[in-house]
C-alpha cells in the first residue's frame, strides 16, 4: 500500500507539530503549512489523500479555502478534516461544504485525531469523489465480488490469469526469432542479449496495450504511469479509443498540464504555470491592467483556470474569435510540451460530469504528432509571457 499524504494547514506551530508527531509514526506523510495559500500550492503540486484544516487561517477563512479546493478539478475530490475551537462554526461548515467530511473541536487528544484520520483514510465511503486506483475487468465484475462457484476467481486473480495468457501468447510469437537471434549472439551474455531483443521487439508495449484492451474504465478509476512506459500520445490515443471522459494529468518539471476529455475527445487543455502556458502568444500584456494580469496568473496557479479565460471574464479579451484562438493555440502548445518531455509522471482520472468551467469553454483539439525528445537537443521559443514574479 502506498504512503498516504496528509496536508496540515494551521498557523499554530504547536498544533502542526502535534499532528505531525501523531500521524508520522503510523506511516503517514505529513506536509505542514501555515496559510491557505501554502495549502493550495501544496495540494495542487501533489494531490493529498486528506487535508487537516484549521477553521481560521492568517490569510483566509476555511470556508474560502474549501471553495478554492472545490473549484479546482485537481483538488475537488480531496476530503477535508476541519479542526476548530468553535464547535458551532465547524458543524455549520461540515454541513455546507461538500469536501468537509468530518470535524474535531479543539482541544483534542492526539489519539482521537489518529483514530479519526485512520477511519477517514481506510473507509471507502469517506468521500465518493476520491478515486481508487483500480482497473475493472471487461466482464463488469466489481472489486471484492465473489461468485457462488467455489472455483470462481476474484478480480485480481482474473487479471493475473489474463496477464499470464497474454504474456505467453506474446512470448510465443517473439520466441520464433530465437534461432536467428542465437546465430547472431556471438559471445554476448544470453541474459542481456535476449532481454534487449525482447524490449526492441516492443514486447512490453504490446502486452500493455493488450491489458488495457482487456479492461474497461469505470467511474472511480485512476491509472498512473511514467511516459517512458507508455507515451503521452499512446495514452491519449487509448483514451480516445475507449471514449473516456475525465482528466489526464502530466507532471512536467516546471508545470503540470491537464487535458480534459469528453467521450474520448480532447475539449480543454491547461496548466498551472501562466508563464509557460502563455509563451508564444501574440498578446501584448503591457497594455492590460496589472492587477487583472496578476489575478489571472494567481487563478491559473491555484485552480488551473486558463490565463485567457480570466482575462475574458474580466472583460479584457472581448473578441470571441481571438479568445478561442488563444485557448486553442496555447492549449496545443501545452500538450506539445507534455508530449515532448522525457520520463514524466502521468495519470488519468475519470470525471463525469466534467467541471462546469471546462464545459463552458470547451473546444475540439487535435492531438499533435510530436516526436519523442532528443536529450542532446532542445527547442527554444522566443515570445512575451506574463510576469509571474
Image (spheres, helix red, strand yellow):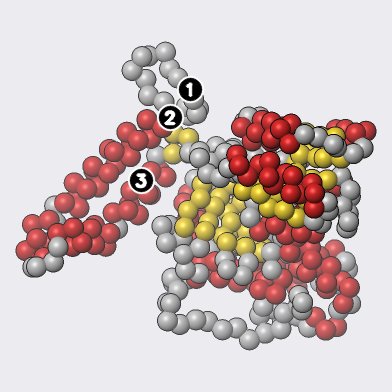
Q: Is mark 2 on a helix, strand or loop?
A: helix
Please determine whether, in this image, residue 55 is positioned above or below residue 138: below
Q: Which mark is residue 210?
A: 3
Nearest-to-viewer mark from 3 and 1: 1
Q: Which residue shows up at 41% across the image and 57% down it?
A: 229
- Closer to the chain start, of discs 3 and 1, is 1
Residue position for label 1: 145
Q: Which mark is residue 155?
A: 2
Q: Viewed as shown, does residue 174 lie left or right of 111? A: left
Residue 279, position as x, y percentages in the image: 67, 78
Name the foreground residue: 340 vs 321: 340
Please determine whether, in this image, residue 139 is positioned above or below residue 254: above
Q: Distance between the residues labelled 3 and 1?
A: 24 Å
Q: Viewed as shown, does residue 103 lie left or right of 77? A: right
Disc 2, disc 1: CB below 8 Å? yes
Q: How far apart are marks 2 and 3 (CA)?
A: 17 Å
Within 10 Å of disc 1 (Cα), the crowding (few <14, some 14-19, many 20+) is few
Q: Which residue shows up at 43% across the image and 29% down it?
A: 155
Q: What element carries label 1?
A: loop
Amino acid at each position: 500500500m502506498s504512503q498516504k499524504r496528509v496536508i496540515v494547514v494551521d498557523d499554530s506551530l504547536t498544533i502542526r507539530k502535534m499532528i505531525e508527531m501523531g500521524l508520522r509514526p503510523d506511516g503517514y506523510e505529513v506536509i505542514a503549512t501555515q496559510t491557505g495559500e501554502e495549502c493550495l500550492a501544496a495540494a495542487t503540486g501533489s494531490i493529498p489523500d486528506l487535508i487537516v484544516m484549521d477553521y481560521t487561517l492568517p490569510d483566509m477563512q476555511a470556508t474560502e479555502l474549501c471553495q478554492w479546493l472545490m473549484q479546482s478539478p485537481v483538488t475537488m475530490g480531496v476530503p477535508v478534516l476541519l479542526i476548530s475551537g468553535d464547535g458551532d462554526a465547524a458543524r455549520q461548515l461540515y454541513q455546507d461544504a461538500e469536501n468537509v467530511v468530518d470535524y474535531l473541536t479543539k482541544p483534542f487528544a492526539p489519539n482521537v485525531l489518529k483514530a479519526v484520520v485512520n477511519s477517514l483514510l481506510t473507509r471507502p465511503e469517506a468521500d465518493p469523489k476520491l478515486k481508487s486506483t483500480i482497473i475493472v475487468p471487461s466482464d463488469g465484475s466489481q472489486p471484492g465480488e465473489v461468485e457462488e462457484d467455489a472455483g470462481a476467481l476474484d478480480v485480481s486473480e482474473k487479471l493475473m490469469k489474463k496477464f499470464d495468457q497474454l504474456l505467453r501468447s506474446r512470448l510465443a510469437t517473439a520466441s520464433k526469432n530465437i534461432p536467428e537471434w542465437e546465430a547472431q549472439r556471438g559471445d554476448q551474455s544470453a541474459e542481456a542479449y535476449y532481454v534487449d531483443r525482447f524490449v526492441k521487439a516492443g514486447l512490453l508495449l504490446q502486452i500493455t496495450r493488450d491489458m488495457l484492451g482487456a479492461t474497461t474504465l469505470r467511474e472511480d478509476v485512476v491509472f498512473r504511469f511514467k511516459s517512458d512506459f507508455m507515451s503521452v500520445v499512446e495514452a491519449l490515443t487509448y483514451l480516445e479509443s475507449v471514449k473516456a471522459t475525465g482528466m489526464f494529468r502530466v507532471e512536467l518539471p516546471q508545470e503540470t498540464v491537464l487535458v480534459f476529455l469528453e467521450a474520448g475527445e480532447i475539449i480543454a487543455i491547461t496548466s498551472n504555470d501562466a508563464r509557460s502556458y502563455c509563451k508564444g502568444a501574440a498578446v501584448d500584456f503591457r497594455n492590460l491592467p496589472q492587477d487583472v494580469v496578476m489575478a489571472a496568473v494567481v487563478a491559473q496557479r491555484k485552480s488551473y483556470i486558463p490565463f485567457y479565460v480570466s482575462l475574458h471574464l474580466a472583460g479584457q479579451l472581448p473578441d470571441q474569435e481571438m479568445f478561442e484562438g488563444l485557448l486553442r493555440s496555447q492549449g496545443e502548445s501545452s500538450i506539445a510540451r507534455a508530449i515532448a518531455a522525457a520520463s514524466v509522471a502521468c495519470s488519468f482520472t475519470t470525471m463525469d460530469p466534467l467541471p462546469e468551467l471546462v464545459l463552458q469553454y470547451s473546444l475540439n483539439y487535435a492531438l499533435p504528432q510530436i516526436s519523442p525528445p532528443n536529450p542532446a537537443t532542445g527547442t527554444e521559443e522566443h515570445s512575451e509571457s506574463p510576469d509571474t514574479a
